[in-house]
Amino acid sequence: MKKTNSFFKKIISRRNTAKILSDMAARLNIRILVTDAGDNIIADIGQDGEFEKSGNSGNSMVSYPINAGGDDQIGFIKGSEGCALVASVIDCIAEIESDKRDLTSELLSKYREINLFYDFAENINIRTDFNEMAKLTSMQISELLNADSILIILKNENTGLLEVVFAFGEGAEKYTPLKPEDAVIPERVILSGRAEIVNDLSADVELAGILPKKTGSVLCTPLRIQNRVTGAIYLINENPIAYTSENLKLLMVFSSQIAAFIENGRLLQNLQETFISTVYTLAETIEMRDSYTGDHTRRVMNYSLAIGRNLGISGDELETLKLSSILHDIGKIGISDSVLLKPGKLKDDEFEIIKSHTILGEKILKNIKQLNHIIPGVKYHHERYDGKGYPEGLGGEDINLMARIIAVADSFDAMTTDRPYRKGLSCDAAFSELKKCSSTQFDPAIVDAFIEAFPDIKEK
């Protein structure tokens, strides 16, 4: 015997449905037997007694199917011929309940989708890293849509080739790099700007000729930035499934979010590059006052970044180090030429004026909100590890890390640069000086990191 249909049983068990059956059985003076599709009895209502076998005179039993508006039978109303009306009423009630169930299920599904999109929008707005954003997006897509592999593909503007910039899913690795046969659908979507669904690759006449050994289903939507299609999101299933237009609409929502993120990232990168270029130009303008320090800014920046990377610094922190090293001497703009460009040894009062460039640098940067975070590196790059530096006599790790890095980079460049009053040291001689002053003037870990990283700097 088959298992009782819980949906139909629930309908019949409701108080209002039971009352309708009872009232109709009483008014028609009949007995009603309700069963599910597996002939499991759900209710026995009305006159007492047993039904006679079908075909005998009198109380012969007739069976009326209940379909609830669908193709499959979910139950039966059994009884005399008078049960036809009862069956019609119950079938109508079951159809209404079935529609309500489907509507409730659809509403719950939409509510879940809305919640996921809300969470996605909240999370993506605080992301600045592309890989973080791509992973979050792929996880959300995976939760809503069935896919073995999710690929974010961009068209290389220089080569015109499609490149997988992010892959998600157990089978995604085999699509990186993208083979020509796997690029057919994304290329078509990018070229036409129209999304595509293929629910059985082997049954598609056009694609079967191009991809004779490919089976499964794919869903692909364009990444559109303003009026340009720059890439696609590509969902791949190894086995055929039934994607729908609703699935396509969902993926297009994600596509628009990803495209906006990529465009905003590009604009932000351009803005940052313009900002860095402006800052660098400012530093070079200051540097031009002293012809003997030509290219000092670039070298100190390169040395500092090499040390930072060797120490594992990355992301925003590395960007802070870059800006700090570029502008480490910005305070010298306030030092008179008679002191700044003096070829001989400085007097005590003149040296005090030179030392003030760290404080002047702080004052200048305080007026630029976007550069406030680099003040410690600029202000403290003449502090000493033993606490005998300036302007505040800080020591050890009390000195800002950026400042400790710049101190090594700046001193190395000063030692290896020719001056009017002396010839610059060789790199090896300068390394010896750094080691000699390690733990007194310089942080020993940073000296070691610089010496270790230096061969890579020279190769560049």
Image: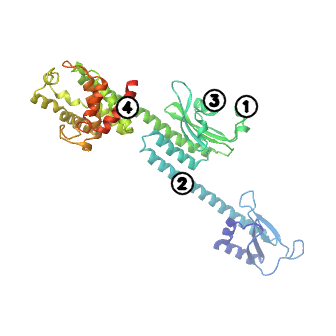
* Mark toward the start of the polypeptide (2 vs 4): 2
Q: In the image, is 121 to the left or to the right of 346?
A: right
Q: Which residue is mark 4?
A: 453
* Mark toward the start of the polypeptide (1 vs 2): 2
Q: Is residue 460 visible?
A: no
Q: Which residue is mark 1?
A: 209
Q: CA distance from mark 1 to mark 4?
A: 54 Å
**Quadrant location of the N terminus in the rendered image:** bottom right
Tell me if label 2 and label 3 are in contact, CB under 8 Å.
no
Judged by depth in the image, the label closer to the viewer, 1 or 4, is 4
**The quadrant where residue 400 appears:** top left
Please tell me the numbered disc located at residue 112. 2
Judged by depth in the image, the label closer to the viewer, 1 or 2, is 1
Judged by depth in the image, the label closer to the viewer, 3 or 1, is 3
Q: For the residue carrying disc 3, how many other residues have a C-alpha within 10 Å: few (<14), some (14-19), or many (20+)?
A: few
Q: CA distance from mark 3 to mark 4?
A: 40 Å
